[in-house]
Structures are given as C-alpha cells and as structure tokens.
Image (tube, rainbow, N blue to C red):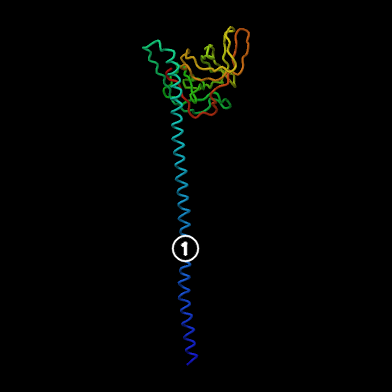
Amino acid sequence: MKSKLKFFLVIGYIVLISFYASDSLKKYFIDATNLVVGQIYSIASFVKDSFDEHFAQVRLIKELKEQNEKLQEKAALSEAFSYELSQVMRDINSSFVPESRKVRALSYAQIGDHSKIWLDFKEFDSNKIYGLLSDGKTAGIVINQNDRPLAVLQNDQKSMFAVYIGEEKIPGIAKGNGKNIEVKYIAKWLTPQVGDEVYTSGLDGIFFGGIAVGKVVELIDETIYITAVVEPAADVKVPSYLYVITKG
C-alpha cells in the first residue's frame, strides 16, 4: 500500500514538473522566436531603407545634373547679355537675344583623334560655322563635314575664332596648336601680358562676345606679329553633351 502511494506521488511529481517545465520551455521558445522575428524585421527594414535612400540619391543626382546643365547654359547666355549690353547701351533699339542649343556627342570622327566629334544637331545649317560651349566657356567650333555637323575642339588646328585679350581688348585670332590655344596676329605695338584673360570678341559671328576662352601663359615674339599661348578655361575631354551657339 505504501509502495503504491509512493509510486503515485512520484508520478504526480513528474507530471507536475513536466507541466511547469513545458511552460518554461514554451516561454523560452516563444521568446527566442520573437527575438528572431524581430531581428528579421529589423534587417528587412534596414535593407528597405537603404534601397530607398540609394534610389533617392540616384534621383537627386539626376535632378542636380539636369539643373547644372541648365545653369551652364543660362550662365553663358547671361555673360552674353552682360557683355553685349555694355556694348550697345548707346543704341536703345538694339534687340540682341543670344540662343544656344544642347547637342549630343555621337562619336569621334576618327580613331585616335579626340579633337573632332560627330554631333547630333538637328538644326544644323551646312553653310554656317557655329560656336561651341562647355561649362559656359568656349570649347571649339562646329563645321560642315560631308553635310554633317562636326565639332572641332579648340585645341585643334582647324578651330579658329576671334578674341580679345585683357582689358585693353587686344584683338587676335584664337587657333588650336594640338595642346593649348594660340592667339595669332597680335600687332607688334600692342602689349598683351602673361596672366591676361582671353575672351571672345563676337566680331566673327561665331560666338557672341564676352565668353571666357582662357588665360595667357606665354608670349612669343614672331617675325611680324606676337603670338600669345593660352591655357583654355574649359577642360573638354570626353564630352557627352555640348552647347552650340545658334544665334549670337
């Protein structure tokens, strides 16, 4: 009788311990599961936030790039208005309105020659020579080549346009020398200086006046005239887009 009582007491004790132990185990597993689920949600939220931030940055960069391109064009046109305004204040009937067109660079005209580029320029007139801008500064000219618009960057020998040097407005012709720009045909009695700013004169109808070309870094005393070597203001390497002066 006593042995049976002891047996039932032991069984009851085991059942009781098992019951409480099960609750403890359940609580442990539930807590562990909640922790894992919480970590998964945290990771998922972090990944989502990271992706959202990345795409937001991509959109912002794209928007800023587009705004920058528009500001470059406006900067160049503003320079033109300012320069021309100072020239024509005496003529109240003047109606100078410069215009430019954003064009896409297609490909190099010849392998190994990075100074000549085919352009996607719908309004191209084969009878005209156009001025070319990059970052609001001179980049070269656009000429006709087999009835197609060809950009000739200003370091190329075929690039030529009229410029002024310094505050004295010393006239000359800017021409590429393969690396920099040389301003040719400066009269001997004129006195350009190293460090003088060079800018377009607008006298050739290619550019409007007042656009930055570069700075004089060297003067060469030729036989009958002076040549000024100019470091270009614009660094045009592999352009995707350029601006063409359609009215200057």
Is residue 2 placed above or below 177 in the rendered structure?
below
Q: Looking at this rendering, what residue extends furthest in the bottom direction?
A: 1
Compared with residue 228, is residue 17 higher up or lower down, i.e. above or below?
A: below
Q: In this view, does 172 lie to the left or right of 12?
A: right
> Residue 56, position in %: x, y?
44, 41
Tell me the quarter of the image containing the C terminus: top left
| As drawn, 1 above or below 93 | below
Which residue lies under the disc numbered 1? 33
Q: How crowded is mark 1: few (under 14 residues within 10 Å), some or many (20 or more)?
A: few
Q: Position of residue 61 (x, y in %)?
A: 46, 37
At x 38% / y 15%, what residue is drawn? 95
Front residue of 105/148: it is: 105
Mark 1: which amino acid?
Thr
* Image spot of residue 145 (x, y percent): 49, 20
Query: Which structural element holds mark 1?
Result: helix
Marks counted in the figure total 1
The picture places residue 45, in percent across and down from the top left corner, at: 45, 52
Q: In this view, does 64 lie to the left or right of 93?
A: right
Of the pair 194 and 146, the residue shown nearer to us:
194
The residue depicted at 46 percent of the width and 22 percent of the height is: 76
